[in-house]
Image (spheres, rainbow, N blue to C red):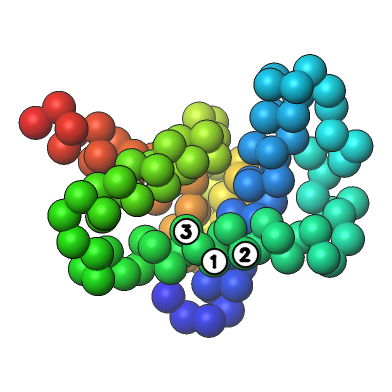
Amino acid sequence: MNPETRKQVEEELSRQIHGVYCRYRKEVHGEEYWTKGNYDLLDEKTKEADRYMARFFLTLASRPDEMKGEEMRDRLDWATQILEALQDDSPCEFDHHGYCQAHGWLNEDRCPQDALKEFLASRTLREKG
């Protein structure tokens, strides 16, 4: 993945992490977070915390060979649980430029939600098989 695309993926993942946090606050604590899921309302310091998580997930996904056995399974299971929470079940909708409008992906690369669905489906098949 080129650096510009990685930065876009990181930012989109950060937005989704913030959305998951807002849902968590509402569902678990019964209170709505002040942004109501609007990532753009956050200050840069708070956005950086979400970006830190996004970079962690992207790094974890890019270096699976460095971990062995149980540690890798544990981390992958943990990351999979978080990715499941970030998954948007709505289908991709592409415009005439090939950009996914449903998920706000304005890049010609594959929509991260499409890749996420494929990854989670492969994990499910592997666990069943």
- Residue kind at label 2, given as amino acid type: Tyr
Q: Which is nearer the eye, 70 or 99?
A: 70
- Residue kind at label 3, given as amino acid type: Phe
Above-or-below relation of 44 to 25: below
Could you classify mark 2 by the number of other residues whose Cα lies within 10 Å: few (under 14), some (14-19), or many (20 or more)?
A: few
Q: Which mark is residue 52?
A: 2
Q: Which is nearer the eye, 44 or 2?
A: 44
Look at 69% across and 20% down and name the residue there: 27
Residue 98 horizontal/vertical position (percent): 53, 57
124 left or right of 97? left
Q: In the rendered image, which residue does mark 1 sit on?
A: 55
- Quadrant location of the N terminus in the rendered image: bottom left
Circles 1 and 2: CB distance less than 8 Å?
yes
User: Is any atom of residue 14 visible in this view?
Assistant: yes
Look at 65% across and 63% down and name the residue there: 51
41 left or right of 49? right
Q: How far is mark 1 from mark 2, CA to CA?
A: 5 Å
Outermost residue toward the bottom in this view: 3
Residue 47 horizontal/vertical position (percent): 76, 60
User: Is any atom of residue 97 visible in this view?
Assistant: no
- Residue kind at label 1, given as amino acid type: Arg
Could you classify mark 3 by the number of other residues whose Cα lies within 10 Å: few (under 14), some (14-19), or many (20 or more)?
A: some
Circles 3 and 1: CB distance less than 8 Å?
yes
Q: Which is nearer the eye, 71 or 7?
A: 71
25 left or right of 74? right
> For numbered disc 2, what is the local secondary structure?
helix
Residue 120 horizontal/vertical position (percent): 34, 39
> For numbered disc 1, what is the local secondary structure?
helix
Q: How far is mark 2 from mark 3, CA to CA?
A: 9 Å
Q: In the rendered image, which residue does mark 3 sit on?
A: 57
Residue 104 horizontal/vertical position (percent): 65, 50
